[in-house]
Amino acid sequence: MKLTDKVALITGSSQGIGAAIAQRFAAEGARVVINYNSNPDKAKEVLANIEAKGGTGFIVGANLGVVADVQRLISDSIAHFGRLDILVNNAGIEIHAPFWEATEADYDKVLAVNAKGVFFATQEMAKHLMATKRPGKIINMSSVHEDLPFPNFTAYCMSKGALKMMARNLSIELAPFGITINNIAPGAIQTPINTALLNDPVKLTALLGQIPLKRLGTTDDVANLAVFLASADSDYVTGSTYLVDGGLTWNYQEQ
């Protein structure tokens, strides 16, 4: 098992990609912190699945758009397990709105979770690792839209573009402490956030036509890469973004 004796916090891990990563990390030997914002029952389901397979988990509720909540999430995780080795900044939101209709509230909500929350969670994690003089792994769940335009989701694209530069900058700044940071950029993945797409045959067929591998990604496709980036296998990897998109980015045309 690649993550034996490691402690990992995965934000937004009560469902979707985050839940898959939490369960996969536990299967690889890590003790995991499961984070939710508004759905504790889903978090309990993830924990039950982990424990049923002999794993260990701990649930912490926190709103990643509130810095005090972010700081408490990190401190509660450390208090429970004694330390953290891996942080996966997975929590994120998107709001559909033409640019000229997007409100200040829309902008603030998206940037608070997708950029500010990631910034301060990473800061708290780095401070913990530096204080305890240990190396660590930070993984940001970005998106193909850190590079690829996505009309009607400008604030979302801005937030993901910020993660691209954040990883590049911190790969230099945190390297002296043995801390690596990388981004995973999923494309079209079968998750609850894509329910509308999955139920629209016309849009789904059009999208699949632009994916060279001719299928949507699964949460396991993303979790597999997350295990690599969290493990010793990636010790010489930092500041990079890894696309998990079936080739979509290089074949995409806006409809």
Image (tube, grey):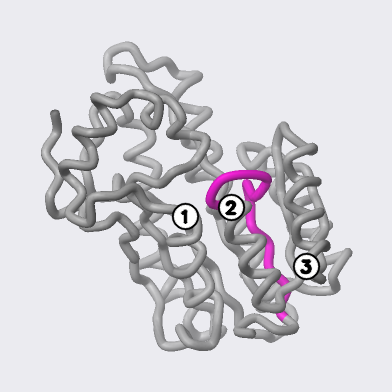
Q: Which mark is residue 18?
A: 2
Quarter of the image containing the C terminus? Answer: top left
Q: Are marks 2 and 1 in contact (CB under 8 Å)?
A: yes
Where, by quadrant of the figure, is residue 182 drawn? Answer: bottom left
Q: Which mark is residue 141?
A: 1
How far across and how far down the image is residue 52, in percent? 81, 62
Please report the residue visible at 48 percent of the width from the left and 87 percent of the height from the top: 233
104 on left or right of 157:
right
Please report the residue visible at 85 percent of the width from the left and 73 percent of the height from the top.
82
Sequence-earlier tag: 2 or 1: 2
Callout 1, which amino acid? Met
20 and 138: which one is in front? 20
Q: Does dot 2 land on a helix, a strand or a loop? A: helix
Give the number of the mark in front: 3 or 2: 3
Say few, some or many: other residues with alpha carbon within 10 Å of mark 3 (under 14 / 14 to 19 / 20 or more): few
The numbered disc on residue 112 is: none
- The quarter of the rendered structure image containing the N terminus is bottom right
What residue is drawn where x is 39% and y is 31%?
198
Please give the range of residues in magenta.
6-18
Q: Find residue 110 and report its horizontal and vertical position in percent.
A: 48, 32
Q: Position of residue 189 (x, y in %)?
A: 40, 46
| Residue type pointed to by label 2 | Gly
Horizontal relation, residue 182 to residue 49: left or right = left
